[in-house]
Amino acid sequence: MNNEEYNILAQRQHSKYFMRFLNVLPSSLSSHDTTRVTIAYFSVSGLDVLGSLSSISIELRNRIIDWIYRLQVQPDKETGDMSACGFQGSSTVNIDFNADNKLYRCGHLAMTYTGLCILLTLGDDLSRVNRKAIIEGVKALQTEEGNFSATLSGCESDMRFVYCAACISYMLNDWSGFNIKRATDYIMKSIAYDYGIAQFPELESHGGTTFCALATLSLTNQLDQLTEEQIEGLKRWLLLRQIDGFQGRPNKPVDTCYSFWVGASLKILNSLQLSNYASNRSYVYETQDIVVGGFSKWPDTCTDPMHTYLGLAGLSLIGESGLLEIVPTLNITKRAHDHLKSLHEQWANES
Amino acid sequence: MSDCDDNDAGWIFYKDRPDWSDVKPVPEDDGPTPVVVIAHSEKFEDVYDYFRAVLQNDEKSERALELTKDAVELNAANYTVWQYRRELLKALGTDLRSELDYVESVIRLSPKNYQVWHHRRVLVEWLQDPSHELDLTEEALLQDPKNYHAWQHRQWAMKTFGLYDTEIEFVDSLLTEDVRNNSAWNQRYFVHNNYTGWSDINVQKEISYTLEKIKFVKNNESAWNYLRGVLIHDKRGLNGNGLVTSFCEELYRNRCRSPFLLAFIIDACEDAIKKNEADGCHNAIRAIELCDALATKYDKIREKYWKYLSNRFQKYKSENGDNHSV
């Protein structure tokens, strides 16, 4: 359906949609119990992209900031060990432990990344972030292979957490916990025969992991490690993902979130302008719920905060009016990124 | 994963269980300013209040092991529950075979959950027994042939324990079922990379196989990508394999205008140019024609991309003299 009437951003509804998620969620979302910070990130950054950050009152802003800081895992009081530091995704296991089992309370890279995004977006000065500890926490999670585990407490390691670790290091302006060479080797090994990039070496190329890899190479200034052949191959692979919207893998259905993952990857390679904006835009709008707000992955299916945020971020990448500009690597607005830059300057002057 | 109803028959809250009366539940402390609050069911809260209690007490008992099952059922994505469960299995010396069966049943319910597959992998590592992994992943893949988690686990098990023998038949059956299954094509590549190798004979065999599949469905990106991937191992490059070249030319002559065919010919032209073959300009001219055809007719959605490629060839042509005419 290309009905023009529906190709209009339901800005007010989306703002309300995010505000609801910041408040209370139904029990059907219990499986998101340990990752509530990511829902807060989609909502806060989503409101920012919509230019609706003012919907968040000062009181709510402070509540969110305080809530995030409560999830920060501090260095071990006795030993000073920082390997578990970072942010937790919720207070599910935000309890005191004794020495034997204290590693159950540990940061999670995706939560640290999105937690920092929230703080920046809300204009916090990160003064309560224990930067050194967080970086030590990142360092503890890099594996032999060069990728990162999500947490110390028994988790898988793959390209997603390479990306999160890179974002955290970039935001805290400290790369001492991130071995760039090893991570770059890992990324290079994960480039597949079709030039897309996989979660793990030899797995199938995927739009989401290609984004994680390219954003990491960009944040670490390693894009020049890609050969011309690889760059041209990546452009082709990414552009072939466009059907009307974008799919994540060849011969898979289109999904709203790839308008961001693939769109941002192309933007990082300065090639988004080679895609077809009009078709992309129409598809994303087909997945918009204009009554209660939100976007879904497919038309006429259930909306969720992730697809809503990524739908908006995808539209922002192609210059949709009424939306703030997105920085494709960090996936926050340019406005929030400017704030980060001013903090970096401030830290440089302090040291 | 959906929440379980509070009213499942016979369910007794932990707080009402006499055999748990010695444990003081630990409610979640979300601080004075909670946001993004999930309105959990009473059952969820009860189970997790007791989970926090055993975790904090570091209780290593059979009842704690049972409790983690309830916690998993309510949220299989809670990695702390799984990690604690593993600690319990070690401490209690539980039969890991029955644990394999248990996690298999959870995988059936949540086949796209990272934590369950991670748990499975740790168990297989502990047991050093991968004998069920091919069957388990096969079952998951029959349900969803593109399940990334299942493929990742399968590749891990195959690589770690060398389980390559029958994989090519499995891949073949998936491709017979759906020739557009990109995951299966990727797995085919994986098998050759790690097991069969890329001898000249094998490269030639794979090319024949792929061309047969392309003949069957010409507009299939996965097969064309695979062809290109196989040709990485052919020293003659994209444009030097006679079988491939004549196959493409015949398709073209028979009026096939699949964008993937045209793109392949363009890349073969580029390959020839890069190798400084004598008729560089001729190749550039042909590539430009094909790019223009794609941009204006056969792949209009990527119009800008094909024009961009066309310009690159134009540049080559003007830098290298275009006195050859077609």
Image (cartoon, rainbow, N blue to C red):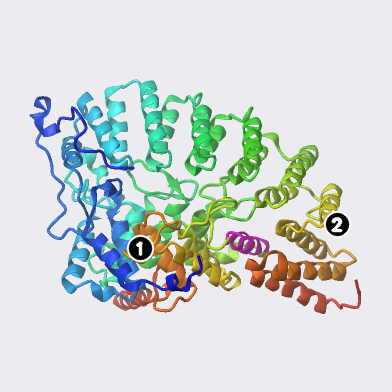
> What's drawn in magenta, residue-wise?
A229-242
User: Any magenta on residue A224?
Assistant: no
Q: Where does the C terminus of chain A fall, quadrant-wise?
A: bottom left
Which residue appears at 86% of the width and 71% of the height?
A: B281
Circles 2 and 1, Cβ within 8 Å, touching? The answer is no
- Look at the picture and state if A7 lies above or below B19: below
- Look at the picture and state if B276 lies above or below B164: below
In the rendered structure, the answer to whether residue A228 lies left or right of residue A87 reads: right
> A85 and A39: which one is in front?
A39
Label placed on residue B253: 2
**Amino acid type, mark 2:** Arg
Q: Quadrant of residue B313?
A: bottom right
Q: Chain of mark 2?
A: B
Residue A16 is situated, as x and y percent measured from the top left of the image, at 27, 67
Q: Chain of mark 1?
A: A
Residue B273 is situated, as x and y percent measured from the top left of the image, at 82, 65
Tell me the residue that label 1 is attached to: A294
In the rendered structure, the answer to whether residue A89 lies left or right of residue A200 reads: left
Q: For the residues marked 2 and 1, what is the alpha-carbon distance in whole angstroms?
A: 49 Å
**Amino acid type, mark 1:** Gly
Label 2 in the same subunit as label 1: no
Residue A27 is situated, as x and y percent measured from the top left of the image, at 24, 48
